[in-house]
Amino acid sequence: MLLALRNYQQVHSWHSSDRCGCAGPVQNNSEWRNNPKISEVLPESGPGFCTYNREADGKDQVALADTIRFVTDLGLEWEKESDVPFQVGDMSRQGGGDFPPHSAHKNGTEADLRPFRKDGEMLPTNINDPSYDRGRTRQWVTLVKKLNPQSVVLFNDPELIRDGLTRYYKGHHNHLHLRVDNGLDQQQGC
Ligand SMILES: [Zn+2]
């Protein structure tokens, strides 16, 4: 009974926390509001990827067309390497701008993703959980860096940080934050 309760609490805390919840440097750039270019919606799934915590009509998975194309192209390449899709969560809102509780996700160039699990299930995990698949997560970030060397991935696996694949950012033990490089100078955030 106690174990079941603990498991429930663990799963519950995973579900409530695998969105960015931290308060990092805030981007106060008003040009990101009502940007008509931030209007492309990520499909609910496609070759090599699927989505999680998705709102109706993908209202929380809107981005610049280039960002959407990067994610779907990444899926096509990833499918050649892996039979486990990657999972995409929050991106931006229509037109960009504030997306609580995120401090970033305002400009249509970012996405949260779940780390991979050894059992291949489309569920949360984190770097301290036995289900976490470091090998496959490393493989995925390596592909991202190959396709877009300037992209930034925030994720707190110390081995991936040591190898220069990801950067530490508080709260990022249970999700990866991908910022696709679009030539703009942007602050780090989540
Ligand atoms: Zn994020």
Image (cartoon, rainbow, N blue to C red):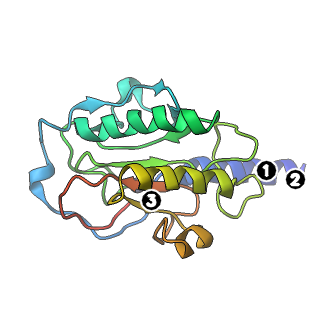
In the rendered image, residue 78, in percent from the top left (x then y), is placed at 52, 38
Q: Amino acid at mark 3?
A: Gly
Ligand 1 is within 8 Å of the C-beta of the residue at disc 2: no
Lateral position of residue 157 relative to residue 51, left or right: right
Mark positioned earlier in the residue sequence (1 or 3): 1
In the rendered image, residue 157, in percent from the top left (x then y), is placed at 59, 67
Q: CA distance from mark 1 to mark 2?
A: 6 Å
- The vertical placement of 9 against 128, above or below, is above
Tag 3 residue:
21
Q: Nearer the viewer, residue 106 or 8?
A: 106
Q: Nearer the viewer, residue 169 or 70?
A: 70
Instruction: Judge whether residue 22 can be spotted in this image.
Output: yes
Tag 2 residue:
3
In the rendered image, residue 4, in percent from the top left (x then y), is placed at 85, 47
At mark 1, the secondary structure is: helix
Q: Amino acid at mark 1?
A: Asn
Tag 1 residue:
7
Residue at 60% over, 73% down:
158
Give the number of marks: 3
Lateral position of residue 42 relative to residue 29, left or right: right
- The vertical placement of 53 against 172, above or below, is above
Q: Amino acid at mark 2?
A: Leu
Task: Count residues near mark 1 (Cα–Cα under 10 Å), then give few for <14, some for 14-19, many for 20+.
Answer: few
User: In which quadrant of the rendered view does residue 189 lie?
Assistant: bottom left
Instruction: Judge whether residue 53 can be spotted in this image.
Output: no
Q: Nearer the viewer, residue 146 or 138?
A: 146
Quarter of the image with the C terminus is: bottom left
In the rendered image, residue 91, in percent from the top left (x then y), is placed at 35, 43
